[in-house]
Image (spheres, helix red, strand yellow):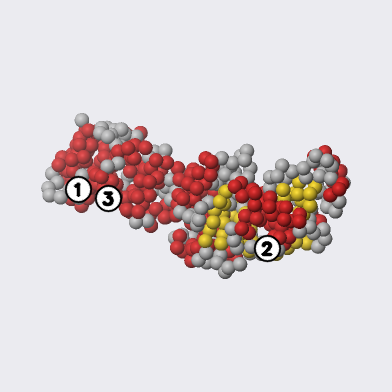
Amino acid sequence: MSDAVVTRFAPSPTGYLHIGGARTALFNWLYSRHTGGKMLLRIEDTDRQRSTDAATAAILDGLTWLGLGWEDKPISQYARAERHREVAEELVRLGKAYPCYASAEELAEMREKARAEGRPPRYDGRWRDRDAADAPAGVTPAIRIKAPTDGETIVRDRVQGDVKFPNKDLDDFIILRSDGVPTYMHAVVVDDHDMGVTHIIRGDDHLTNAARQQIIYDAMGWDIPVMAHIPLIHGADGAKLSKRHGALGVDAYRAMGYLPSALLNYLARLGWSHGDDEVMSIDDMIGWFEIEDVNKGAARFDFAKLEALNGLHMRRMDDAELLDIFERTLPYLENGAVIAERMDSQRRAQLLAAMAGLKERAKTLVELADGAAFLFAERPLPLDEKAAALLAGPARQVLAGALAALQGVEGEWTSASTEAKIREFAEREGHKLGAVAQPLRASLTGKATSPGVFDVLAVLGRNESLARISDQID
């Protein structure tokens, strides 16, 4: 075995890339990058009833959106069934596995008997040492591995430590069904060996599988990869993660306006830490990630923390980079269609100029789209309820005075030049600055909240600003 680290991410294409799978992919990707190795991708599509091309496409799309690239072409487990059968038959030739002719009725009887005696259901080994001459005519057998019957199997795990399994509990499990279809348990081992996988990082719900899979490795005389079983993600209430907690596909997080960098930062912190560092760049995570630093206990998913972290990532991001991500995400945002439709070079420039103020008030790209909507609104602007209230009664007279003051701006139209005129007007007329700024904001944006009103004036420019204010007076 070469010294280069090879990890793999092996999702089943029965649905979208869910958040737990995304974290498993992230840990494999980080470790491969940290060690200068590579991460491979295997689609575990042996369940033909539930595997779909649409789900495979969604998984690849989710990984690509997150920036978790893989080396080489994705491998289909189903396409390798012939190789899995070959290894199962090799194990029979080696005397490490055997054909089993037990019928469905016999197996049901075994389960019933075990239940009645208060034992877990286990195959009783009845065909383990029988002569092939005893085989019933016309029956195609399954193939079972010869598991050790005494002692224990120890999984030496980088996260969980040494985990011991009594061999009597592992039984002679099936590696090839009677219809010639390999079992998941067997296919995984053959694939990992053939792909040269050196490190298996996956959820701790696979820990018992690891003990069974070691039996196949040993039977074939193959090196066992380094195992690391990471804790599952729970909801904030400590219960197993479900849809109400956030067990959604990563596509849902894109639609909710989260940045890939923030989501990866948050997922990395679910079960792994580096000192007190909360906000991490991708390069930080690659530099710091060690399997041994992953906690044994389940991590708790918390939307409020994710949102706060996303806001931090947005504020720290370069305005042009954030605008680029925002534009690419618009088709997925429920409030992004109008912005995407009306985006042109002038509005893009305005949005870039407004970005510093907009990102201070937004925790997600959905909120950023809300904040930016005023730039893409058509005149006359529709007012929301709070904005309409700000323009009620004497506020329109104040607005008319503000309009006259702004019409007097000479030279360059900037936030400084407009602010000077409005302050001068407010002082002269005995108004508080807020009493002038609030109706101005409502008339310019149609909302009661926005970036600083003088920044809004500067971004919209002289003609559009004066026209929007005039609309509300007329």
Residue type, numbered disc 1: Thr
Is residue 376 shown to the viewer in this render?
A: yes
| Image position of 355 with respect to 137: above or below | below
Q: Position of residue 276 (x, y in %)?
A: 51, 64
Q: Judge left or right: residue 145 versus residue 403.
A: right
Give percent across and percent down for residue 329. 40, 45
Callout 2 amino acid: Trp
Instruction: Give the quadrant of the C terminus.
Output: top left
Res 434 → quadrant: top left
- The residue depicted at 68 percent of the width and 48 percent of the height is 182
Instruction: Using the image, tell me which numbered label, if any, was put on residue 353.
Output: 3
Q: Which residue is mark 1?
A: 418
Which comes before the other along the chain, label 1 or label 3?
3
Q: Write down the residue under mark 2.
A: 222
First of labels 2, 1 by sequence position: 2
Instruction: Please name which of the two marks, 1 or 3, marks the residue nearer to the observer.
Output: 3
- Where's residue 382, x and y in %? 30, 33
Tell me the kind of residue under disc 3: Ala
Count neighbours of disc 2 (C-alpha within 10 A) and say few if under 14, some if 14 to 19, many if 20 or more: few
Secondary structure type for disc 3: helix
Evaluate whether residue 244 shows in this view: no
Q: Which mark is residue 472?
A: none
Is disc 3 surrounded by few (<14), some (14 to 19) or many (20+) residues within 10 Å? some
Nearest to N terminus: mark 2 or mark 3 = 2
Question: Is there a contact, CB below 8 Å, between mark 2 and mark 1?
Answer: no
Q: Secondary structure at mark 2?
A: loop
Residue 313 x %, y %: 42, 55
Secondary-structure class at tag 1: helix
Q: From the viewer's perspective, is 313 left or right of 18? A: left
Q: Nearer the viewer, residue 430 or 62?
A: 62
**C-alpha gap between disc 1 and disc 3:** 16 Å
Q: CA distance from mark 2 to mark 1?
A: 76 Å
